Amino acid sequence: MKKYCLGNWKMNQSLEEVKAFSKDFQESSNDLYIGIAPQAIHIPYLLENTQIFIGSQNCSEHKSGAFTGELGPQFLNELGAKFSLIGHSERRQLYKETTESCIEKIKNALSNDLLAVYCIGETLQEFEQNQTKEVLKNQLLPLLETFSINDQDNIVIAYEPVWAIGTGKVPTLDIISDVTSYIHDLCLQYKQDYSVVYGGSVKPANIKDISQIPSVQGVLVGGASLKAESFGALCRAF
Ligand code: PEP
């Protein structure tokens, strides 16, 4: 299965920092799919000045029209963007995105040749109450009931425990292995087998162990993707 090293810059990076990253980042996408989702305004610069895949942090479920502030997949594709994160926990929590709206966004992304990186994960409370698999199942079933084996290469599932994002807390390797195996098994019940990446406080210090878990096909990284040096170190672990 293909491996992915994906960066989510969120609402960070000045133009100067984007330029410095582009100059210093030496890796290129060959066997490993290396992608960065910057603020949308920096997509054109990164497309012109790097050798990696550039994507968006979100995209609209609508084709075009009166949707102020939204990003249309058709227009992202026109620019040369290659993927979109969909359903990141910050979008779900801060902007009230639902699994149902995420499925519509994935449909729209796929119709416009964007790889959809579908983010799922449980909150701390759900984790502590042993509800992780139930929560993930609820987030995954609408996906599995909508798409098919034909979409296999166009969707990646990002397992991101909400409590691990930006906190420095990482689940044990056994938990990451168990949960990502569960995701693969559930997908297989629907005759689908997507690449599954892990996200949540991935750093150069823990990437070696995480990258060796057989049910993990890569990582989605926030903080450690901002600097060329640390993101490069993560890419080299695969
Ligand atoms: C993320 O934003 O998806 C993420 C995983 O962030 P961090 O690596 O900073 O925890």
Image (cartoon, rainbow, N blue to C red):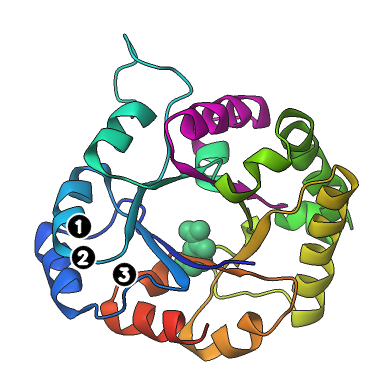
Above or below 9: residue 136 = above
Toward the viewer: 1 or 210?
Answer: 1
Indicate the quadrant where residue 17 lies.
bottom left
Residue, x 82% and y 55% (percent of image)?
132
Q: Check contact, mark 1 vs mark 2: CB within 8 A.
A: yes
Q: CA distance from mark 1 to mark 2?
A: 6 Å
Secondary structure at badge 1 equals helix
Q: Is residue 108 above or below residue 185?
A: above
Residue that label 3 marks: 226
Does residue 114 appear left or right of residue 184 in this picture?
left
Amino acid type shown at disc 2: Thr
Does 120 appear in magenta?
Answer: yes
For the residues labelled 2 and 3, the Cα–Cα distance comes to 14 Å
Three-letter code for the amino acid on which mark 1 is drawn: Leu
**Residue 118, magenta (yes or no):** yes
Viewer can see residue 72:
no
Q: x%, y% of residue 222?
A: 43, 64
Residue 217 image point, x, y percent: 63, 69
Q: Which disc number belongs to residue 46?
A: 1
Q: Nearer the viewer, mark 3 or mark 1?
A: 1
At label 1, counting other C-alpha atoms closer than 10 Å, the crowd grade (few under 14, some 14-19, many 20 or more) is many
Image coords of residue 118 (percent x, y): 59, 45
Residues rendered magenta in the picture: 94-122
| Left or right: 83, with 187 as reference point | left
Q: What mark, if any, has residue 2 been given in the picture?
A: none
At horizontal 38% and vertical 31% (from top left) the residue drawn is 73
Residue drawn at x 34%, y 14% as measured from the top left: 64
